[in-house]
Amino acid sequence: MNSDTDKNDILDPSPDATLLIYLGAINIYWAMVEAHVSAALFSLLELDDLEFTILLGRLEIVPKLKKLEQILRHRKNEEKEKFVTELIKCVDKLRPDRNALTHGVYQGKSNRGEYAFALMADVLFEEDSEAAKKMRVFTVDTLKDHVGETIDLLPKIHAAFDSPKMLKLYDGPFRVPKGFQVDPLPAIREETPKSQPQSFQKQ
């Protein structure tokens, strides 16, 4: 999210434990989403896992999704093509914040509880996108929402492309747990949380 947070509002330049935990969760779950997208694309191609990795292993998530979309359009699979088109929109919506949190330089925490990140000129690689904003800020709530929305993509991708071949890649180097915890904080607290964190259990 964007904000007009002024640098004079920054109180503490050191990242606190809460921020570090959410940053870890966001990196973990985004890696899972990318693995699911790779497995979905792999499931449609007549390639073994090594050939697939050679051809597409370093491709970013959106180009992979667009190739997936093109293949489905060519095969006239309108249902799955529509799903992937919507998935691209969801990923594009999440990526600006994910890029800021991954590539941005942490500036500190304001007295309003906002975590500020600055994107330096050398990583402003999408000049026409929201990711190109120089300063972005986040609260605990927006970080938790981001984790939840990222997790929500996983069962949808799996359900749409579930097949023995997808599972060959999905359960290989990209094996992921069956349960996903949206709020990582209670898991690292010594005390028992008063309420259970929101979670998703793969059906």
Image (cartoon, rainbow, N blue to C red):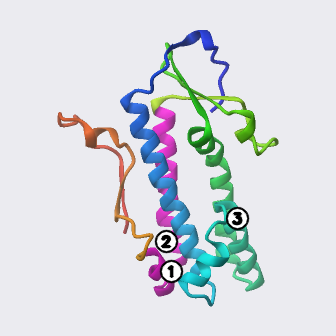
The quarter of the picture where the C terminus appears is bottom left
The residue lying toward the viewer, choosing from 184 and 86, is 184
The residue lying toward the viewer, choosing from 36 and 174, is 174
Badge 1 marks a residue whose secondary structure is: helix
Residue sitting at x 39%, y 47%: 182
Report x, y in % for residue 79.
66, 76
Query: According to the image, label 1 marks what residue?
Result: 166
Contact flag, marks 1 and 2 (Cβ < 8 Å): yes
Q: CA distance from mark 1 to mark 3?
A: 20 Å
The mark total stands at 3
* Lateral position of residue 119 relative to residue 188, left or right: right
Query: According to the image, label 2 marks what residue?
Result: 158
| Residue type at the position of mark 3 | Thr
The quarter of the picture where the N terminus appears is top right
- Residue interval drawn in magenta: 141-170
Report x, y in % for residue 118.
64, 29
Whether residue 118 is situated above or below residue 92 in the rendered picture = above
Q: CA distance from mark 3 to mark 2?
A: 16 Å
Residue sitting at x 49%, y 41%: 145
Q: CA distance from mark 1 to mark 2?
A: 9 Å
The residue lying toward the viewer, choosing from 125 and 155, is 125
Residue sitting at x 45%, y 23%: 14
Query: According to the image, label 3 marks what residue?
Result: 85
* Lateral position of residue 56 relative to residue 192, left or right: right
Q: Nearer the viewer, mark 1 or mark 3?
A: 1
Report x, y in % for residue 173.
43, 72
Badge 3 marks a residue whose secondary structure is: helix
Question: Which comes before the other along the chain, label 1 or label 3?
Answer: 3
| Residue type at the position of mark 1 | Met
| Residue type at the position of mark 2 | His
Question: Which comes before the other along the chain, label 3 or label 2?
Answer: 3
> Which residue appears farthest toward the left when viewing the image?
191
